[in-house]
Image (cartoon, helix red, strand yellow):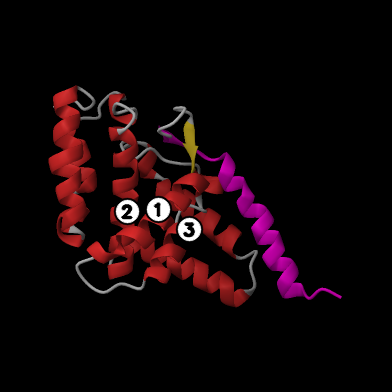
Amino acid sequence: MLNERFLKQIDFITEIDKLKNIFRQNVIIEGRRSENDAEHSWHMAVMAILLSEYAPEKIDVLKVIKILLIHDLVEIDAGDTFCYDEKGYLDKAEREQKCADRLFNILPKDQAEEFLNLWREFEEVETPEAKFSACLDRLQPSILNYNTEGHTWQKPGVNKEKVLKRNMIAEEAVPTFWEYITEVIIKDSVAKGYLKE
């Protein structure tokens, strides 16, 4: 007979399949359809493996991958809040906390605590792993925008200043990312008209 722990894990696995239906503002490079949260998380997990050597301090890459795969699961209930939507950010933390409480508690207690702690760690952006994860969470959409003629940067109110502010965490946390974002992506995007000055 199957044990309760296993069945809870299967219930959670089934529930998080919903992440594939949470669509982001960004579009994928090839085909230009909306990217979903699951694709976004997978893309960053691969980026973490490839780019971990640029972290200025030692990081636990497996922990970074866990954070990246977990950090947007709360959007199953809360939805994806566009990073330049000031009004949407007013209740974002509350919506996401409510989902975290519901979703992670599907799991067995020890795993529920681990996932909740990893999600909180990402949100607090204090540890080297959380900072690196947050920088990847800025770099990945920047790469997509650059390769889709600034798809989300064409939305009303988005300009160079806002994009710089959004990516500012990388300046100290991962200087290589900051240099690439500012000196290649942003500079070239402004020159090509993908991003308003």
Give the labeled residue for mark 3. Answer: 69
Q: Residue at x 29, y 26 (%)?
A: 149
CA distance for labels 3 and 1 = 8 Å
Does label 2 or label 3 sit earlier along the sequence? 3
Q: Is residue 12 magenta-colored?
A: yes
* Local secondary structure at mark 2: helix
Spot occupied by residue 97 in the image (x, y as percentages of width and height): 48, 56
Mark in front: 3 vs 1 = 1
Does label 1 or label 2 sit earlier along the sequence? 1
User: Residue 93, relative to residue 64: is it above or below?
Assistant: above
Q: Amino acid at mark 3?
A: Leu
Q: Residue at x 28, y 54 (%)?
A: 135
Give the labeled residue for mark 1. Answer: 44
Q: Which residues are magenta?
A: 1-27
Q: Amino acid at mark 1?
A: Met
* Local secondary structure at mark 3: helix
Spot occupied by residue 155 in the image (x, y as percentages of width and height): 31, 25
User: Residue 130, relative to residue 192: is it above or below?
Assistant: below
Spot occupied by residue 89 in the image (x, y as percentages of width and height): 36, 43
Q: Residue at x 63, y 49 (%)?
A: 17
